[in-house]
Amino acid sequence: MSRPIPVARRLSKAWLRGACVPYTARRAFSAQVTGSRTTDITALKVNQDRLMETLHQTCSWGTGKRWGSGPNDTGMSRLALSDTDKQARDWFVETTSSLGCHVKVDAMGNIFAVRPGRREGLATFAGSHLDTQPSGGRYDGILGILAGVEMLKTLKDHQAETEFPVGVVNWTNEEGARFPISMCSSGVWAGDIPLETAYNLREVGGGTATMRSELERIGYLGSIPASHKSTPMAAHFELHIEQGPLLEAEKQKIGVVHGVQAYRWFMVDVSGRDAHTGSTPLGKRADAMLLAARLITHSHRLATKHSAVASTGILSLTPGSTNTIPGHVRFTLDVRAPADSTVEAIEADLKRDFAALAAGENIQGLLDGATPSLPLEVSWRTDSVSPATLFHPDCIAAVRASAEAVTGDKSLVRDMTSGAGHDTVYASRHCPASMIFVPSKNGVSHNPEEYTSPEDCALGAQVLMQSVLRFDSMRASS
Amino acid sequence: MSRPIPVARRLSKAWLRGACVPYTARRAFSAQVTGSRTTDITALKVNQDRLMETLHQTCSWGTGKRWGSGPNDTGMSRLALSDTDKQARDWFVETTSSLGCHVKVDAMGNIFAVRPGRREGLATFAGSHLDTQPSGGRYDGILGILAGVEMLKTLKDHQAETEFPVGVVNWTNEEGARFPISMCSSGVWAGDIPLETAYNLREVGGGTATMRSELERIGYLGSIPASHKSTPMAAHFELHIEQGPLLEAEKQKIGVVHGVQAYRWFMVDVSGRDAHTGSTPLGKRADAMLLAARLITHSHRLATKHSAVASTGILSLTPGSTNTIPGHVRFTLDVRAPADSTVEAIEADLKRDFAALAAGENIQGLLDGATPSLPLEVSWRTDSVSPATLFHPDCIAAVRASAEAVTGDKSLVRDMTSGAGHDTVYASRHCPASMIFVPSKNGVSHNPEEYTSPEDCALGAQVLMQSVLRFDSMRASS
Ligand SMILES: [Zn+2]
Ligand SMILES: [Zn+2]
C-alpha cells in the first residue's frame, strides 16, 4: 500500500475561527481532492450508514427493554464488566487492532487504542464508555466510542496520516450503575479515586462481586497501571448525547461544552421507629417514610430556590411490610448547579432544614394540616463531590471551529454547560479536553427510549473527528 | 388417675358482671380449696414462670435481630411455613397432644388442638398465630398461642374438666408477611378468601414458593377442608399484645376489645419518565419519586383531617440509580378508621387529590415554592378491603368480667377498638368472638423490641383462660 497521508502540517490561528484550513497531503484521499496536496480538513467524511449499522450491531450485546416496534427500538442493559460488556470490549479490541491500532488495557480495564501518527508523541483521544445503565439506551457512552471507531475507519479508508498518534479510549464503569462510583476508572486514571477503593467496590443489589473480581473474571485486569502517568494523553474529546432538552428545544445541532456542573451525591438516612400501622395513632409515630417524603418534597423547593437541581434516584426502606410503619429509610440525593458555591449553599440549607423537619419544625408550611409526630433522626453521608469543571480553551475552540465548519451555520451551534458528569471531567485534570453534545429526543436519557437521529449522530461524529484532527494540527503547528 | 373436675355447671347472669361465681368440682384442685366442691372460677391460676419460660424457649425457632444484652433481647423472624415455623408447629402439635388434645390440621395448615369436655359439642377456642413479621418480636401472635397452651397445662395440672371441649388454634400466615394476604388462613376458614387464591400466593421478594408448595414441603397440608363448616367453633378468644400505646399511656392492664377498625390496602403506581438527574431541568421532569413523596405527605394530611391513619410501608422505584430520575414508583397505602364510612371518605379524597397533584394542581400549598413539572400518571389497585368488625356481646362481656375479676380493679380495664386486623375478625363471622389486649411497651410492635412484661403476659393469659371458662360455663347454663 502507498504511504499514509499526513492530515495536517501547519495551522494558523485562522482554524480556531472555523476557517477552512489548508493542509499538506502526500496524495489525495478522495476524488474531490485528487491531484491536490493541499486540501480541506473538512473533506474527510465519516460514513453515517456504517456508523449507525455498527452501533446497532454492538447493541446486540446487552439489549434491554423493547419500547417500540422497530428493529432498534430496544434499550440497553450492559452493566460494567458483565458478560455483555466483555463482548463489547472484545469487539472494540479486535476492531481497533484490525484498524492498525496498538491496544493497551490498564489495571482498571480502561482500553486505549492508539493509531500511530507521523511523529512519536502523545495521542489525541476520542473517549467515552461502552457500559450502560441497567435500563439505559443505545447512545449514552456508546455513541462516543462508536464515533471514535468510525474516525479510525475513516482515517484508514483514506490512508490518512495524522501528525501525532490519535486514539480511542473506552473507560470502565462510567455509569457507576453496577459498581457505585460513576466515572470510576477515569477517576483512578486521574489519581482522584484510589485504586483500592475502586477494586473493592461491591456490585449493588447484594451480589458479592467486586470490580477487581469482575475485571479478573472477564479478562480485563490489565497489566499497566491505571494512571495518567503511565498513559498520558495529549487531549481528550468526547462526543456524547446531551441527555437534556436544550438543543432539541432550540432546534440546534451541536453543543460546544465549556464545562460540567458541580454536583454532590449524598446518602440520607432517616431513623424513626417501626410500628404497626393499625394500632399506632399518628401522634405516637416516628414514621421514617413520611419524613423522607417531606424531605424529598422540600429538597425540590430548595433546588428551585437556588436555581439548582436535586433528585432522589434510590430509596429503600425497612422493614418493608404493608402494615408496618417503616422505622428506617435511606435515600440518595443528587444536587447539581453550575457553580460550586451554589451547591455548597444548597447543601447547607438542606442540612439545616432536614434537621428542623426531623425535629417537627414546620418549614415553609410543609407540616400544615399534619399531626405532630415523635422526633426522628436524619444523618448524612457524602458519597461524591465533583467540583465544577472548566474545559480547556484550545479544545473548546477546536470543537467550536469544527462545529461551525461541519454545520455551516453558527446558529445551529450552542455553547453549553454539561449537567451530567463524564469521563472528560477526570481527563481534563491532566490534559486539554472538551466535549461535543448532540440532541437527545425529548431530552430523555438513562432510559430505553433514549434517541438521537442517525443524521445527528453522524454530524456529531464528524465534529468529533474534526476536533481531534484540528487539535492534532494545532500541536503540529505550535 | 382420678376423674377430672368439671369446671363449671351452672352460671347465673351474675358472672357477666364480674361476680365470683361458684361452680361444682368433684374434688378440690388446690390446697386453698381442698375439701370444697364449690369454688371460685378465679382459683385456677396460670403459671407465669412456666408461661414465659416456654414462650422464650419456642422463640429459639426463628430468633431475629438482637437489640439488647439480655438473653431474650432478640426479635423474631419466623415467616409463615418456613423451617422455623415448622419447628414451632411441631412443638405445638406434640405439646397439645401430650396435654390430652385431639389435634387436627386443615388444608391451610391451621392447627386445631381440642381438649375434650364433659359433654360432646363444639369447642371454645383460644387462638392466634405462631408466624411473625420478618423483623418482628416475641409477643405478637406468639403470646396468644402460648397462653392457650398454658391454659391447657393449667387445666391438666388441676385435672379440671370443662363442660364442653376447649381448644387452641394456630392460624397459618396471619402476618401476610411472606405470603401477602394477612389473616390469610382464617380468611379461608371463614369462606372470605378462596382456597385457590391462598394456595397460589407466591412468597414476596421474588421467590418461587407458593403457600401450597410450602404447606406440602413442611408437612402441614392437612386433609380436612379449611372451612368453618368442617371445623366449626363455639367461640374464639384471642389474647394479643395491643401493638399500640394506649394501655401503657393510661397505666391500664387489660383491653377489652369490642371490634376492629375498618381498613383498606391500596397499591399506588406513579408513572413519570426516567431522565438524567444532571441534564434534565426541573421544569422538564416527570419525577415519579418527587410526586410519590408529595402524595405520601398529602395522605398524612388527609388522615389527620379524617381522624384516621394512613401509612406507607412498602415503596419501590425503578430504575434505581443515583443519577437517574425514577420514571416509576409503586407504594402501598394502608388506610384505617373506626368506621367504614370514614375509610370510604378518605379514599375518595385521596383519589381526587392524587390525580390533581399528578396533573400539577397545587393542593393545600404542597406545590408552593416548587418548579412546575411535566404531568404524571397515578393509578390505584385495591388489595384488601376489611370492613369494621364488631365482636359478640357475650364474648365481650366474658372478657370484661374476667378482666375485672383478675385485676380486681375496674380502672385497670379499658374498652378498646383494635387498630390492627386479627384472625378473630374472620372467626367472628362464624362464631361469637372477642379479644383481650395487654400493654405493649412504647406501643412498639412488628419490631424486634416489641415487649410486654412477664406480669402483663400472665395477667392476659389468666384473663384468656377465665374468658374461655366463663364462656363454657355460660353455654352450659343456657
Ligand atoms: Zn455517558
Ligand atoms: Zn398478631
Image (spheres, coloured by chain):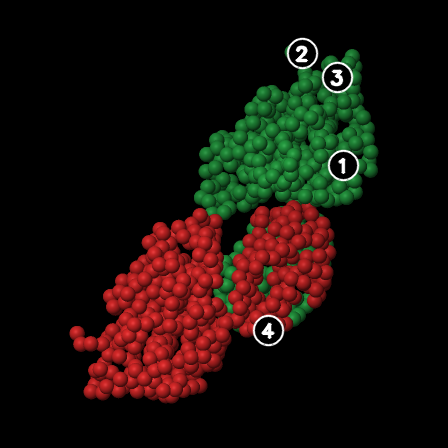
Chain colours: A red, B green
CA separation in Å, label 2 and label 4: 87 Å
The nearer-to-camera label among 2 and 1 is: 1
Relative to B249, B166 lies left or right: left
Query: Horizontal and vertical percent for residue A233?
Result: 38, 69
Both marks 2 and 1 on one chain = yes
Among the two numbered marks 3 and 1 on one chain, the one whose residue lies closer to the N terminus: 3
Among the two numbered marks 2 and 1 on one chain, the one whose residue lies closer to the N terminus: 2
Both marks 2 and 4 on one chain = no
Query: Mark 3, chain letter?
Result: B
CA separation in Å, label 4 and label 1: 56 Å
CA separation in Å, label 3 and label 1: 27 Å
Where is mark 1, residue-wise? B253
Asked if one can make out residue B456 in the rendered structure from this viewpoint, the answer is yes
Q: Residue at x 74, y 38 (%)?
A: B255
Look at the numbered disc 4 and give the secondary structure of its residue: loop
Both marks 4 and 1 on one chain = no
Q: Which mark is residue B2?
A: 2
Along the viewing direction, whichever of B232 and B242 lies nearer the viewer: B242
Q: Amino acid at mark 1?
A: Lys
Q: Amino acid at mark 2?
A: Ser
Both marks 4 and 3 on one chain = no
Look at the numbered disc 1 and give the secondary structure of its residue: loop
